[in-house]
Image (spheres, rainbow, N blue to C red):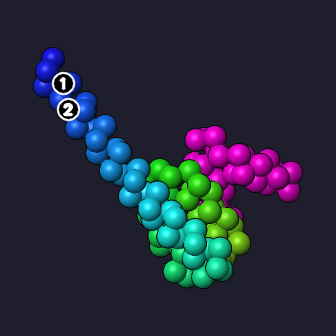
Amino acid sequence: MVLLTFASIAMADIKKVENKEADSLYQQGKKLYDQKNYDKAFPLLLKAAEMGHSDAQMHVGKMYYNGWGVGHSHAKGKAWHEKAAAQGNKESIKKLKSMDHH
């Protein structure tokens, strides 16, 4: 029981570190994205998105969908928006609804 609790605490600590790292990557990538420096923003946002950061997932979806800093792919854009929407990202939910109407 004690071992299980320790393992749970260790996993929670790992998640906190991953969340901090994902948020840091997202903040760096978002700054570059806002400056329209998509080529440099994409790898940072992608890494944060792969770590589960919903805002990063939404931005990666936008970038794929529009071909900003990465090859244009509606399918990959939609897939990333779906991941973000699954976490409640309102912008991705809205984008997916608009995709369904086209």
Q: Residues within 10 Å of mark 1 (few under 14, many from 20)?
A: few
Task: Name which residue lies at 22% across and 38% down.
Answer: 10
Placement of the N terminus among the 4 image quadrants: top left
Q: Residue 84 carries which label?
A: none
Q: Quadrant of the C terminus?
A: bottom right
Residue that label 2 marks: 7
As drawn, the residue found furthest toward the top would be: 1
* Residue 79 visible from this viewpoint: no
Q: What residue type is labelled 1?
A: Leu
In the rendered image, the vertical position of residue 13 relative to residue 63, given as above or below? above
Q: Give the range drawn in magenta.
A: 74-102
CA gap, disc 1 and disc 2 = 5 Å
Locate residue 79: give its quadrant.
bottom right
Q: Pointers 1 and 2 in contact (CB under 8 A)? A: yes
- Work out whether residue 24 or residue 59 is closer to the camera in this orientation and state it: 24
Residue at image location 40% in from the left, 53% down from the top: 20
Q: What residue is shown with label 1? A: 4
The answer to whether residue 16 of the structure is visible from this angle is yes
| Residue lying farthest to the right in this orientation | 101
- Say which element carries label 1: helix
Give 98 or 27, whichever is nearer the viewer: 27
